[in-house]
Amino acid sequence: MNRRDFLITSSAAALAPRITFASASVELVAKPVMAQILPARDPATPMLGFNGNTPGPVLRARQGGTFDVRFLNRIGEGSAVHWHGMRIDNAMDGVPGMTQDVVDTGAEFKYRFQAPDAGTFWYHSHNRSWEQVAKGLYGPLIVDEIAPPDVDHDLIVIIDDWRMTESGTLADGFENMHDQAHQGRLGNYARALVEPNTPVRRGDRVRLRLINVATDRIFPIELEGVDGKIVAFDGMPLPRPQVVSNLVLAPAQRADVIADVTSAGQIAFVFPTRDDPYLLGEIPVEGVNTMRQPSGIPALPPNEQKQPDLDTAVVLTLTMQGGAMSRPASTQTDIWAFNGQSGLTDTPFHRFERGQTARIHLVNDTRFPHGIHLHGHHFFEVGTDASLGAFRDTTLVDAGGTRDIVCVFDNPGKWLLHCHMLGHQAAGMKTWVEVA
Ligand code: C2O
Ligand code: CU
């Protein structure tokens, strides 16, 4: 990443107004919008949005509550909405051709699901996602704990990049094969959008819900002006909060940070690049909170987690293949493949009995990193010392590297397993599993 690849940084902009609801009926209308992606002196950009904005509204409920969303598609082509990271009924997962029919333009679909887990999630189009997500069809999905942690501000930080033209439109070529064979569609302009965009005080305790919604870009993130810990990854609380260092978010990954404001100036979200650091956004600090007593950062209450049965686990290998600068598997039919297969096959990668534990050896036999996402479940990342680490829905596997994951497949249905670099997914890096 080269600093000069980016246009000028602008300050953080406000997201759409928050919609707060639980068990209420909400309409989510996807349609073309004009969005001020570039700084205010530059032209607005034709995009796609929900309810007139990109990012779409914050959908929010309390743990155990119900999301009841009437989705209306007015974008001019088929679409569907996926609730990323939510362990919900298969029929509500939003994958056209697998869990539902595509929602034609002019048509609608009713999504209704309970929120089993508290945490930071997001929603996005799952039809031609490499283009529809790049154009802005996504939004935050927040599930509040029954007893939320004691913070002064609960802030959503959406991180995205866009590939802009000189005239302020999105560059086309969403299926550019050169992009797909490399890192995917990387933007030339990036930003962290903070909601609500209000000043905080020095001494305040803040919760930052970081969400990487970029189609393809991995963001290393440095936080300035705060002192705190990572309390959750991909919505799921860490048993022990972790020091914030080397925080890296692959596309679709989230991190929750609880931190105390130490700066008198601003909280900054910084993207370190090979040249100068790139300022993605900031939150102004005004005034001082003298009331808060110093205290450690507590762990969030855990979400339900079935204990994996490692003794009886089925052991599988999923090898990532293809892309630029590597020899394709002889059987693959597109740029990328898993185990020699590009795209979805008639038979799943594996059929699991309900409740079965699997240990999947992810092997990255390519020259690029991949962020592998499983629908409908979270899984443990296995550490180098064989311990079970973070409980995630998306795991980043370095180029040439490997990672084992352990998953209890307890949610019945057909679930996608794919690279969340959406350009890679478009070019074959996807498969599916079935849970009986
Ligand atoms: Cu974020 Cu298959 O999805
Ligand atoms: Cu990939």
Image (cartoon, helix red, strand yellow):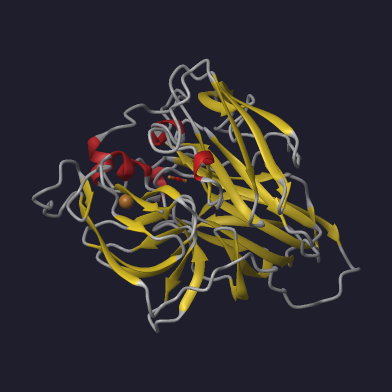
Of residues 32 and 430, the one drawn nearer to the viewer in this rendering = 430
Give the image quarter of residue 241. Answer: bottom right
Where residue 381 appears, x then y in whole percent?
A: 44, 70
Q: Give residue 54's position: percent from left, percent from top.
A: 58, 32
Residue at horizontal 51 percent and vertical 66 percent from the top: 391
Marker count (numbered): 0
Q: Residue at x 49, y 37 (%)?
A: 94
Q: Quick check: can you spot residue 329?
A: yes
- Give the residue at the far right of this rendering: 291
Left or right: 114 in relation to 430: right
**For residue 342, side relative to residue 84 (left or right):** left
Quadrant (top left/top right/bottom left/bottom right) for the C terminus: bottom left
Residue 174, x across and y down, in percent: 34, 31
Relative to 345, residue 248 above or below: below
112 sits left or right of 339 in the view: right
Q: Give how far across and how far down residue 431 sits, in percent.
A: 31, 48
Direction left: furthest residue:
330
Instruction: Judge from the rendering whether residue 130 lies leftward or rightward of residue 205; answer left or right.
Output: left
Toward which corner of the image does residue 98 lie, by quadrant?
Answer: top left
Q: In the image, what residue occupies the spot 67% across and 36% down?
A: 68
Look at the image and tell me whether residue 11 can be seen.
no
Front-lying residue, 260 or 383: 383
Query: For this rendering, which residue is in front, 285 or 368?
Result: 368
Residue, far bottom: 385
* For residue 358, above or below residue 340: below
